[in-house]
Amino acid sequence: MLFETPDTFDQVDKFYQGQTNNSGMPRLVAMSDYVRYSSNDEDRDPWATYRPGIVIHEFNDDAERHAVGADKTALTNIIMSF
């Protein structure tokens, strides 16, 4: 599932940090504009998007938005995999 939001990366990341603190979903940092919350406590690979979890990615420019068909007002991309 793919979502887009006009909220900033920091706002979205802070929200998920609060939601996942008690759920045991480790926060895996790949880059300053990309994190993945894993559903597995043993997971340590932030790039393993084929595993269940939540990816938060900041759009850096219009080209990145256009590549995924996001609205031009979108600032952050949220990907949920099951």
Image (cartoon, rainbow, N blue to C red):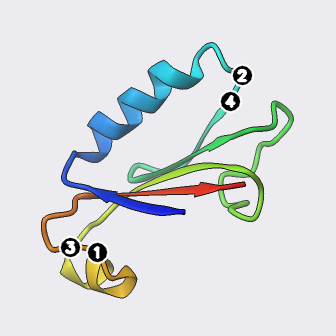
Contact, mark 1 vs mark 3 (Cβ under 8 Å): yes
On screen, 26 above or below 55? Answer: above
In front of the other: label 2 or label 3? 3
- Residue under the point 71% across and 22% down: 24
Give the x, y percent position of residue 3: 40, 60
CA neighbours of label 1 inside 10 A, class few (<14), some (14 to 19), many (20+): many
Amino acid marked by disc 4: Met
Question: Which residue, given by chain and number where applicable, does mark 2 sit on?
Answer: 24
- Residue under the point 28% across and 85% down: 66
On screen, 19 above or below 9? Answer: above
Question: Which residue, given by chain and number where applicable, does mark 4 sit on?
Answer: 25
Q: CA distance from mark 1 to mark 4?
A: 27 Å
Secondary structure state at the residue bearing disc 4: loop
Q: CA distance from mark 1 to mark 3?
A: 4 Å
Q: Nearer the viewer, residue 43 or 5?
A: 5
CA neighbours of label 3 inside 10 A, class few (<14), some (14 to 19), many (20+): few
Question: Which residue, given by chain and number where applicable, does mark 3 sit on?
Answer: 71
Amino acid marked by disc 1: Ala
Question: Which residue, given by chain and number where applicable, does mark 1 sit on?
Answer: 70
Secondary structure state at the residue bearing disc 3: loop
Contact, mark 2 vs mark 1 (Cβ under 8 Å): no
Secondary structure state at the residue bearing disc 1: loop
- Residue under the point 34% across and 39% down: 12
Secondary structure state at the residue bearing disc 2: loop
Amino acid marked by disc 2: Gly
Query: Of label 3 and label 4, which has the lower sequence position?
Result: 4
Query: Of label 1 and label 4, which has the lower sequence position?
Result: 4
